[in-house]
Amino acid sequence: MSEFLSFESLSRFLSELSATVNHIIKINPAPEALSKRSRQTGRVPERGRKVAGEFILRGCGSPLIHSRNNRGCNFPRYHLTPMTENTQLSTINELFQRVAAAANPRAILWQDEFGQWQPISSGQIYQRVRALGQAFLSWGAKKGDRIGLIAENRWEWAVTDFAALAIGAVDVPIYPTLTGEQIAALVADAGCRIAVVSTRQQFEKLNAVRGRTALERILIMDSAAPPEGAVAFSQVLAGADDRGAERDPVFDALVRSVEPKDLATLIYTSGTTGEPKGVALTHGNIAANQNIAPVDFHFTPADALISFLPLSHVTARALDYIMYTFGVQVAYCSQFDKLPQAMREIRPTVFVGVPRVFEKIRQEVERRTALSPVKKRLLAWAVKVGAGHLDTVYDGRRPSSPLWKLADKLVYSKVREAFGGRVRIFVPGGAPLGLDTAKWFASVGIALWEGYGLTETSPVIALNTPRIHRMGAAGMPLSNLDLKLAEDGELLVRGPSVFSGYWRKPEANAEAFDAEGFFRTGDIGYLDKDGFLFITDRKKELLKTSGGKMVAPQPIENKLKTNLFVAQAALAGDRHKFISVILSPNFPALEEWARRHGIEAKDRAELVADSRVIALYAEIVREVNGSLANFESLKRFRVVPDEWSQETGELTPSMKLKRRVITSRYAALIDALYADEATARGE
């Protein structure tokens, strides 16, 4: 991630204005306390009360705490409203028809083998989708058939997606980072007879396990000569671009014949809590979400987005659909290490990343400034100035304070340059965002519009927008959804964007819905008096101490991760006397710190065992404990010499912890933490 941020320009600027900087650092421009509204923005609102086993929100006369027809609630209704009738979607095929009719010469950008950005027009999209769809039909694909899609983010992904849906088929996006055995299991479960892969490597991985599936054809996107047993994408699309504005009425009629109730996609969950399940989403599910989620962002054809989050994840896919709906230019970045360069060249106006991306950017800013006492003090001063204007920034306004403007010129603008310098909409998605991270970015002039949703809900349930927002909240629930809370605080949701069930999992489906048809999200949450949704943690991830106290790990882990030296944190302590934590370091920062402090180590295991390193992390844990209740405070910790990642198995593609993997991998370490539990101090 270090490529994202460059402080060379800041260094030059500081050298030219050193006298000014020295003067600035001596003054104390920001008030110690935030404004009343800022404090309210960052606080955790008062919870509701329980009456006779039902959750009743203060000000509400009904246990149904959020409803599309506002039954029984008196709190203000700021909910997100749908698009106008002439822009409403009922199927994703209608979106494809809009794209095809847009006459946009640069609807898509992609990088060729020389790194040059090449455009694809809306007319070319239509002709390529038509050609691929007709190829699928010629291979015997029919309505309802499943087609596997295993690829990185690239224009061929979008064309394959549109082509499968155009003929009424169901696409099955699969992460290309999975092993061949994992991919085979999903392809077999879905019953795919056709699969589309990106590269020869992906083909060989799938072809090696082909016998375990029902696959008859594998289509490969790369333009090189296809290996034996594969069909080349270029062969299927040959001559498509030469058709110009020609339309095929038979194909168009097939596109229009798809209905909202028709299945569109099977998206397999990442398996953080067990075996992956295929989430079956219809055209109507996805369209219902698309009609409401984006309305307050006012996207236009002047906007640009870099599509880099895995399209196999529902968040990235739904985002791209929104961009196509509003004519936003979509530039595909297939490799994460190319993103910094893409930022500089595309200069996007919309940026959506998982929270870990924002956390890493913050850590990189702090790491680089820590190398210079002047930069470190300057950043601290700028963040302090910005903290006095959180509410103004979060309301989408530019503070008028001269000191804020100076801090913006010296520091905030340099952070924005990491994103290309033009981004006007920042959205963290795919995992919970820590409140400390949201506050830090607002303190450097960047408002992050957090949302909340699940694959099963297509995905958005609640969303903060430039018009309606509360820092720390998951957002305002969409107006076409009903929400209620179970006795244990679990959030349940019902509405047109909620899926009908998991693919061929009748037992799981019976558990997933209550008697009234509400989907059990598995998340613990509440709504404040104004109707903003707050999510506390995953129900299955709550830790229950032997003393009966319930501890939500994610908020504590997020607090730890705001520290420069912590990359990941995983709490332990379920059914134990006290809570402990396993820490995976931010090794670039730790190794730099070790060099400055004269610590020599032959490897990372020796580094994290050094007494000075242990003392460093003890202070980090001690600082976080200062903000925690006694029963949830961290009594013990261990720093491991491992960097957790998707590749090594500890993280999902959306950078969430795989707790079962971590618990299993560090079972001996966890046992050691509790070896003397009987005589140790507990809560």
Image (tube, rainbow, N blue to C red):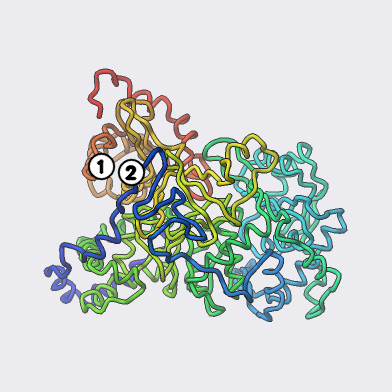
Q: Amino acid at mark 1?
A: Leu
How far separated are the C-alphas under marks 2 and 1?
A: 8 Å
With respect to residue 169, does 571 lie above or below?
A: above
Residue 628 figure quarter: top left
Residue 309 screen position, x and y as percent: 54, 58
| 333 lies left or right of 52 | right
Q: Are marks 2 and 1 in contact (CB under 8 Å)?
A: yes
Residue 212 screen position, x and y as percent: 76, 36
Residue located at (46% from left, 58% from top) = 451
| Residue that label 1 marks | 628
| Relative depth, front residue between 28 and 11 | 28
Could you tell me which secondary element the residue under label 2 belongs to? helix
Residue 164 screen position, x and y as percent: 75, 59
Residue 305 seen from this side: yes
With respect to residue 34, does 245 lie above or below?
A: below
| Relative depth, front residue between 523 and 110 | 523
Q: Amino acid at mark 2?
A: Ile
| Residue that label 2 marks | 556
